[in-house]
């Protein structure tokens, strides 16, 4: 049987609650297991099943993944403690091609849990910060308490490493202490007044389908090349290896040929976004 169909064991070395619904799980394997930004793994919770999940960045001992409790298997994952063993298959998918970002300004736009794979991308960019121009992170969450990794991002903004703007769907009147929360409303409103250099910018977007519907073409309308506007798609994945056809959309096998696509590709995939 192909190695990508057989899970390898991984230890949950750290579990950090990020907000009431999401936890960051740091994993360690005994054999090298590198998951690139934008790639995903199939994670097995013993006795319950497996589900696809993105990397949210590398750690000293492996990689981290931010998981929302949304159904049966993720609920079982939330019952696990540090030191326990899960299974990993992968890594799967194409991931973000960092050469498409090199030498350019980078615009990252995340909605909700979409911040998880973009945090993985941001970490990869920061490993060689000098290769990129401005790095701008626009991130929309439901309420201030749902802003994941807030402290980490605010630290990066405070020391000038990234430019940061948060938006939230609901909040009382914004005031002192809200820091980088710039608007109550859609994350796309954060684009206003941003002074982009479209010819020199590569964008990556991750969030719910409703975000893609409005933001991808809006970015193209600012003059950013559709070949340099990337989005990562979620489909119901099973094998992760291009064999079961569960994830096929518009004739494209998302687990194998994606999940990261540029806008030019997405325009030729009806129903993809
Ligand atoms: C490439 C990829 C990367 C992902 N990355 C992450 C991540 O970083 N963190 C994270 O928490 N989740 C991520 N997901 C989603 C995660 O796989 C699902 O939440 C998980 O499969 C739910 O499993 P469950 O058994 O707990 O829920 P189920 O009982 O199977 O479903 C619970 C609810 O989630 C919906 N759902 C299940 N799977 C999907 C899916 N693939 N897409 C959309 N809706 C779904 C169901 O319709 C249902 O409403 C990713 C999915 C993909 C395909
Ligand atoms: S998940 Fe099986 S083909 Fe993509």
Image: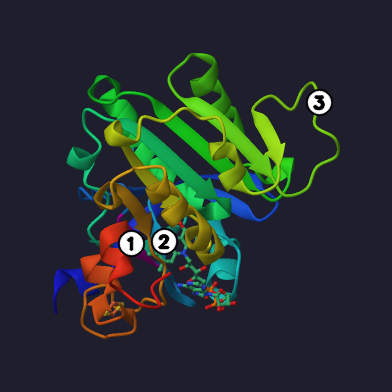
User: Could you tell me which residue is drawn at 47 percent across and 60 percent down?
Assistant: 212
Question: In the figure, residue 78 lies in which quadrant?
Answer: bottom right
Q: Is residue 117 visible?
A: no
Prevailing secondary structure class for the magenta stretch in the rendered image = strand
Q: Which residues are magenta?
A: 39-43
Q: Point out the tag, 1 or 3, that comes first from the N-terminus.
A: 1
**131 magenta-colored:** no
Apparent side of residue 130 relative to residue 195 in the rendered image (left or right): left
Q: CA distance from mark 1 to mark 3?
A: 41 Å
Closer to the camera in the image, 214 or 251: 214
Residue pointed to by mark 2 = 53
| Residue 111: assigned label | none
Find residue 180 and report its horizontal and vertical position in percent: 64, 27
Residue furthest left in the image: 2
Secondary structure, mark 2, is: strand
Quadrant of ligand 2: it is bottom left
Is the residue marked by circle 3 packed among few (<14), some (14-19), or many (20+) residues within 10 Å?
few
Find residue 91 and report its horizontal and vertical position in percent: 25, 59
Residue pointed to by mark 1 = 41
Is mark 2 in CB contact (under 8 Å) with mark 1? yes
Apparent side of residue 112 relative to residue 217 in the rendered image (left or right): right
Apparent side of residue 254 relative to residue 16 in the rendered image (left or right): left
Label 1 or label 3, whichever lies nearer to me, is 3
Is the residue marked by circle 2 packed among few (<14), some (14-19), or many (20+) residues within 10 Å?
some
Find residue 3 and report its horizontal and vertical position in percent: 16, 69
Q: Is mark 3 within 8 Å of ligand 1?
A: no
Q: Which quadrant is home to the N terminus?
A: bottom left
Residue pointed to by mark 3 = 175
């Amino acid at each position: 049987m192909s190695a990508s169909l057989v899970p390898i064991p991984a230890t949950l070395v750290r579990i950090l609650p990020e907000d009431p619904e999401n936890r960051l799980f740091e994993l360690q394997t005994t054999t090298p297991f590198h998951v690139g930004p934008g790639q995903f793994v199939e994670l097995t919770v013993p006795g319950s099943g497996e589900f696809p999940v993105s990397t949210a960045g590398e750690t000293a001992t492996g990689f981290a993944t931010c998981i929302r409790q949304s159904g049966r298997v993720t609920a079982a994952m939330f019952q696990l403690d540090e030191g326990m063993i899960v299974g990993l298959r992968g890594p799967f998918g194409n991931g973000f091609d960092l050469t498409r970002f090199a030498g350019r300004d980078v615009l990252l736009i995340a909605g909700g849990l979409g911040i998880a794979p973009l945090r993985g991308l941001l970490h990869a960019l920061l490993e060689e910060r000098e290769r990129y121009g401005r790095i701008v992170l626009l991130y929309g969450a439901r309420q201030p308490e749902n802003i994941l990794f807030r402290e980490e991002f605010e630290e990066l903004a405070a020391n000038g490493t990234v430019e940061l703007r948060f938006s939230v769907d609901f909040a009382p009147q914004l005031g002192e202490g809200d820091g980088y929360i710039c608007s109550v409303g859609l994350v796309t409103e954060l684009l206003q007044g941003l002074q982009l250099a479209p010819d020199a910018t590569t964008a990556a977007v991750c969030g719910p389908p409703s975000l893609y519907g409005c933001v991808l073409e809006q970015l193209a309308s600012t003059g950013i090349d559709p070949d340099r506007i990337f989005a990562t798609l979620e489909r119901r994945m099973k094998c992760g290896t291009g064999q079961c056809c569960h994830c096929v959309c518009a004739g494209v096998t998302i687990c194998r040929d994606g999940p990261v696509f540029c806008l030019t590709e997405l325009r030729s995939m009806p129903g993809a976004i």
